[in-house]
Image (tube, rainbow, N blue to C red):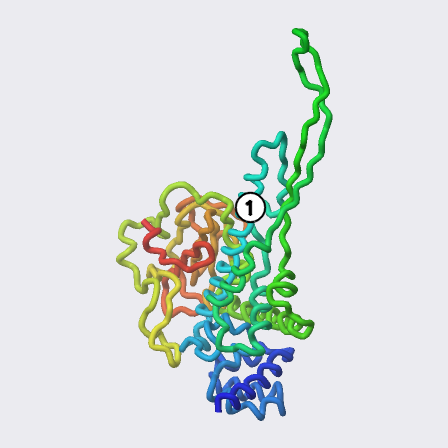
Amino acid sequence: MVDDRRDSLDQLTDAARAASKVAKIVQAAQAGGAAGAAAQTVKEYHKQAAMVIVVVLLLPVLLILSLPAVVFGSLLAPSDNVLTDEMEIAENVITIKNSIGTVLQTAYEDVLAEIDADSKGRYSTEVIDPVGGQVSFNALQILSMYCAHMGATDYESINIDDLAEQVKAHQDEYYSYTAETETKIEMVDQIVNGIPTQVPEPHDYTTYTISYAGDSYFAETVWQLDEKEKSFASDYAQNLTLYLQEIEEREGISILEQINDLTADSTVPVAEGDFGNPFNDPGWRSHITSRFGKRADVGLPGKDTTNHNGLDIAYGYGTPILAVQSGTVITATTSPSYGNYVVIDHGGGICTLYAHCSRLLVSVGQTVSKYDTIAEVGSTGDSTGNHLHICFIVNGQYTDPEPYLH
C-alpha cells in the first residue's frame, strides 16, 4: 500500500513540477482544501491527475509537491494548518534563509580568521573582499536545489534541519582566498659606517582576495544535480516565488524582501533610546484587544487557534498613530489583509509595521522621528473594528511588540 502510494506520489510530483500555472492549484487548495486542490488538478493535468486523485484526497500535500516541500516542515507529516496558515509557511521560508545564512556567515568569518593568521609578521597586506561583511545568496534557489535533490527518492527526510545539516557539511568549501605576494625594492634610511644613507631593500606586499563559490556550487558539488534536476529546481524556485508574492498581496508583508535582506538594514545601528508607544499615551496598554501569539479562533474555517503576528490596540477612528522610534519609511501602501499600512526601518534589523489605518501620512523614503504622526486609526483591510495592528519584525522574524513598547 505504501509503495503504491509512493508510486502515485511520484507521478503527481512529475505533473506538478511540469505545471505552468501551479498557483491556481495552490489557491484552490487554500480555498477548498484537498478537494479543491483535486478539482483544480483535474482541470490542469487531465489524465495525469485522474490516476492519482485519490492520493491527493487522502494526503493533502499538493502544495508540498508543487513547491519546495521543506517549506511545510515535512512532506508526509505536514503541519495540521499548513494549507491555511500562510504566515507559518512564510516564517518557515525565513527560517530556512536564516539557517543557510548562518552557515555561510560562519564560513566567511572562518576565511577572514585564516587570512588574519596568515598575515601575521608580513610587511604589508591588503584584503580584497567583495563580500564586504554581508554574505549574499539566493535562499529560494538553494532551497529548491535541495528539494530537487531529495524529492525524487527520499520524501520522508525532507525537512529544515536536514537541509541545514547538508549545507553545513560543506561549510569549509563556500569561501576561499588567494594570496599573491609582490616583492618591491624600496630605498630605506640606514646608518652605514656612521653615515646616514639610503639603501635598497626588498619588501613583500601581499594581497588577499576572498571569493565565494557561488550559489551554483550547491547544484554542481553539494547535491550534484543533473540537468533534469536543475530544471526542477528552477521550476520550484519560480513557483515558490509566485506563491510568496500571493501571500504578500494578502498579508501585506514583504516576505521576499525579508528573505533577500532588503526589509531592514542590519548594518545601520538601531536608533538610540527606548521605543515609545504608537499613541504616546501612558495608558495605552488598557486599549490592547489582542496580544501576540496563539489566540482563540477568529473565524477561520477549521482552525481552533490562529498565530497572531502582532498586537491589536483599539482607539477611535482618526486617532493619530505615531512612530514608536525614528527611522525610514520603506513601505506605505495597501493590501487586502492589512488595508492601509506603513513599515518603518529603525536599523539594527528592526522594522515596525502599522496596519488597518484610515489614512497614511508618510511616503516611502521619508525619514521620521520618534512620535512623528505617520497615519490615523481605521478599520481598512481584514478588520472588524477601528484599531491599530502593530508588528515588530526583528531580523526577519515576527516578535512580540510588548517588550519593546514603553
User: Residue 193 placed where, x, y %?
Assistant: 67, 8
Tally the numbered discs: 1
Residue 36 visible in image: yes
Front-most of residues 337 and 308: 308
What secondary structure is found at the residue carrying circle 1? loop
User: Residue 48 placed where, x, y %?
Assistant: 62, 89
User: Residue 221 placed where, x, y %?
Assistant: 63, 63
Front-most of residues 204 and 322: 204
Instruction: Read off the residue under disc 1.
Output: 133
**Residue at the top extreme, as displayed:** 194
User: From the viewer's perspective, is residue 331 above or below residue 163?
Assistant: above
Instruction: Place residue 230 in its image quadrant.
Output: bottom right
Q: Residue at x 61, y 32 (%)?
A: 122
Q: Residue at x 65, y 11 (%)?
A: 191
Front-most of residues 364 and 99: 99
10 Å neighbourhood of mark 1: few (<14), some, or many (≥20)? few
User: From the viewer's perspective, is residue 76 above or below residue 286?
Assistant: below
Front-most of residues 232 and 185: 185
Q: Residue at x 37, y 71 (%)?
A: 306
**Residue at the front extreme, as displayed:** 193
User: From the viewer's perspective, is residue 368 above or below residue 402?
Assistant: above
Residue 196 relative to residue 303: left or right? right
User: Residue 85 placed where, x, y %?
Assistant: 43, 73
Residue 278 relative to residue 364: left or right? left
Q: Residue at x 41, y 56 (%)?
A: 392
Q: Amino acid at mark 1?
A: Gly
Instruction: Place residue 189 in its image quadrant.
Output: top right
User: From the viewer's perspective, is residue 149 above or below residue 266?
Assistant: below
Residue 333 visible in image: no
